[in-house]
Amino acid sequence: MNQAGRILALSTLLALTGCATTNPKDPLEPYNRAMFQFNDKVDQAAVKPAAKLYTKLPSFVQTGVYNFFGNLSDVGTAVNNLLQGKLADGMSDVMRVAVNSTLGFGGLLDIGSEAGLAKHNEDFGQTLGKWGVKSGPYLVLPLLGPSTVRDASALPLDFAADPWSYKDPARWRAAGTGLHLIDQRAGLLNASSLLEDAALDRYAFVRDAYLQRRESKVRDGETPRTSYEDDMGPTAGFDNEPETESDASAAAEGKSSFSAEEPAGKPVVTMEHADANATHPGTAPEKASQNIESAKATPLPASSSSSSAQ
């Protein structure tokens, strides 16, 4: 009896371990979970408290900081849009930088959006994905947070395309980088609080959300074809010919034989994502997606439930 109990306990442990770690997109899960916990400790001890204090500043100060660094990021976005062949978006980004840097007092004011120049968010990881480079395994970077092997390999190019990385002296560059980080974290305070309340395994939730978001951005929001569509076509589930005489007569009269309680056919399931609302005062709707995207560079909190899943 004792031996049978041990065998049952061992089998249960192996099953739970397999469920917790088996994920083809996350072969580095043990390392990633440990790094997720490390980033959370840093966030809880320093970054999140600083972000909460930052939100006490006047709204026009927060908006100015957001706009200033957003204008700098438009430089890299313009380059990546042009490299991806999106010439119209790339030229629009160039115009945004020109308008905001001059009429917007160095980017403190977002005149470009008021003039109808939409803001885009592109990076070299997305460009590599557009060129057909696979994302590779999921990877949590120290302090920077969620990424993939492809996106992490593109980070040096992203840093090189950031004009602030050339700012001298170094102490001003470091201070500005810290301010940018705190501004980004402040924009995610509400999202992280919702995550703390809703997610059972926050590590898995952040991982899956990040991978879906990045895939959507690489595809510019287009949903990839499913295997069901490839096999059956997007209108599968509808018969070309009526099955019964009542169906044939209904078709002749231009009526549908489907009732309100019965679905018209097997629908094609698509996945959608929603951007969280930006929390910066005066932030335009199109800026919300940049706040979500900043999650890859901002450590999100973890919970005890995520460590128990190891």
Image: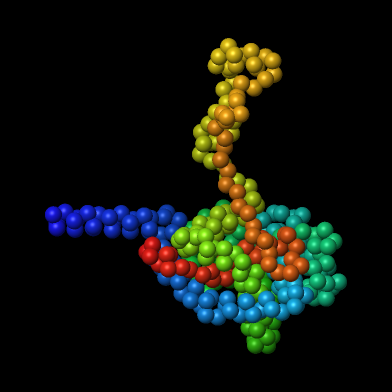
Q: Residue at x 54, y 41 (%)?
A: 226
The image position of residue 119, as x and y in percent, is 74, 61
Classify residue 214 by image quadrant.
bottom right
Q: Is residue 263 above or below residue 133?
A: above
Quadrant in the rendering for residue 194: bottom right
Which x, y percent locates residue 103?
86, 71
When the figure is inspected, residue 45 is found, relative to residue 132, above or below; the finding is below
Frontmost residue, 15 versus 200:
200
Q: Quadrant of residue 97?
A: bottom right
Work out whether 169 lies above or below 277.
Answer: below
Question: How many numbered discs sit on the rendered protein?
Answer: 0
Side (left or right) of 85 relative to 225: right
Quarter of the figure that contains the C terminus? bottom left
- Residue at 18 percent of width and 56 percent of height: 5
Q: Residue at x 59, y 14 (%)?
A: 246
| Residue 190 makes an appearance in the image | yes
Image position, residue 309 (x, y; %) = 38, 62
- Image: 274 above or below 35: above
- Residue 150 makes an appearance in the image: no
Quarter of the image containing the N terminus? bottom left
Q: Nearer the viewer, residue 201 or 102?
A: 201
In the rendering, at what x and y percent does residue 50 appear? 61, 80
